[in-house]
Amino acid sequence: MAEKFERHRQPWTAAEIQKLHTLAKKGMALKAIAKALTRSEESVKDRAKNDGLSIAKLR
């Protein structure tokens, strides 16, 4: 069963966005970034796309 995120549909804070940018620039994988931010992979992917970031495709 997929992990349940308590933060469903919560707006992104400035600190979370900053952390997303930092982790993406370090080349972390999507799954690791999602776990670090306690957000779903889909949410992280959408936010990164909106901000023009590329997430490493490590598996």
Image (cartoon, rainbow, N blue to C red):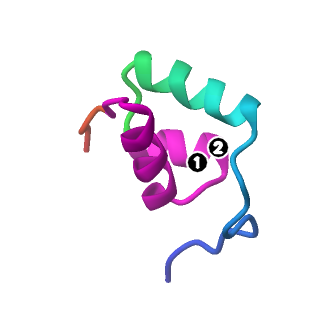
The quadrant of the picture occupied by the C terminus is top left
In the image, what residue type sits under mark 2? Leu
Magenta segment: does it hold 48? Answer: yes
Q: What number of labels is visible?
A: 2
Q: Residue 40: where, in percent of width, then height?
A: 53, 60
Image disc number at residue 37? 2
Q: Residue 45: where, in percent of width, then height?
A: 40, 49
The residue carrying pointer 1 sits among few (fewer than 14), some (14 to 19) or many (20 or more) residues within 10 Å by Cα, namely: few
* Labelled pair 1, 2 in contact (Cβ < 8 Å): yes
Mark 1, mark 2: which one is toward the viewer? 2
Q: Which span is picked out in magenta?
A: 30-55
Rendered residue at 62%/40% (across/down): 36
Mark-to-mark CA distance, 1 and 2: 5 Å
Disc 1 is placed on an element classified as: helix
Q: Residue 5 sits in which quadrant?
A: bottom right
Magenta segment: does it hold 28? Answer: no
Image disc number at residue 35? 1
Q: Residue 17: where, in percent of width, then height?
A: 63, 33
Image disc number at residue 9? none
Q: Residue 54: where, in percent of width, then height?
A: 31, 31
> Compared with residue 27, is residue 58 higher up or lower down, i.e. above or below?
below
Rendered residue at 24%/39% (across/down): 57
Asked whether 56 or 11 is in front, the reply is 11
Disc 2 is placed on an element classified as: helix
